[in-house]
Image (cartoon, rainbow, N blue to C red):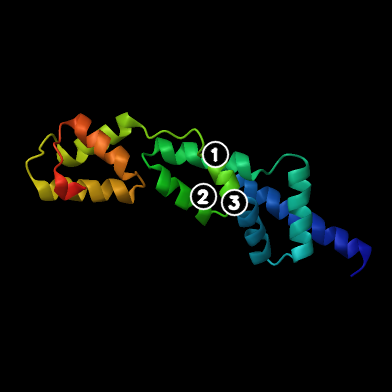
Amino acid sequence: MTREELEKAYQSALDTAAKQLSYRALSVSALREKLLSKGHSEDAADYAIAWLLERGLLSDSRFAESTVHSYERRGYGELRIRQELRRRGVSREDADTALEDYEPDGDALRSLLEKKLKGDLSDPKQVQRTIAFLQRRGFKWGDIRRALNEYGAELDEQFD
């Protein structure tokens, strides 16, 4: 490959990367996968990523923070957010840093409880289904238990 062809390949990868990032934020690994799937060579993909990282236009830590805030606003718990970060190619270190100050939103949990239980705590099966729903959304058992207690549920040993 001539120098001119190589420069053209690198510029094409950079253009594709910029276009992908204009649609939505991506992690470094997700962007790399996109570039490779669009037919760019590994060298060209690495060049584009290095160029963007060098200029601060691509950052896994900023991407992780943004993802945490987005999923938190949508009513998801820490475990589900962590899973989403992993799925999107964010390193464990960046995920841990982004989730460092995470506190489950008690109001969001109470709102979800109200939506599911509608003030009726008399049906243990419905309470169980609600607990399972909150666990699927990524909330930890301790947070769910605290929210249920605040909601007025008296949990017995069947829930431990």
State if disc 1 and disc 2 touch (CB < 8 Å): yes
For residue 100, say whether it is visible.
yes
In the image, which disc is placed on residue 85?
2
Of labels 2 and 1, earlier in sequence is: 2
Q: Residue at x 21, y 46 (%)?
A: 130
Residue type (three-letter) at the residue carrying disc 2 = Leu
User: Which residue of the protein is positioned furthest toward the left in this rendering?
Assistant: 122
Q: Secondary structure at mark 1?
A: helix
Residues 13 and 122: in front is 122
Horizontal and vertical percent for residue 73? 41, 35
Q: Nearer the viewer, residue 58 or 102?
A: 102
Is residue 151 positioned above or below 31 on the image?
above
**Residue at coordinates 26% horizontally, 34% vertically from top-left?**
146
Q: Which residue is mark 1?
A: 98
Q: Quadrant of residue 11?
A: bottom right
Mark 3 to mark 1 CA distance (whole Å): 11 Å
Kindly identify the amino acid type of the residue bearing the numbered disc 1: Ala
Q: Who comes first in sequence, dot 3 or dot 2?
A: 2
Q: Nearer the viewer, residue 105 or 66?
A: 105
From the image, state whether disc 3 or disc 2 is nearer to you: 3
Assess disc 3: are there few (<14), some (14-19) or many (≥20) residues with their C-alpha within 10 Å of its C-alpha: some
**Residue to which mark 3 is pinned:** 91
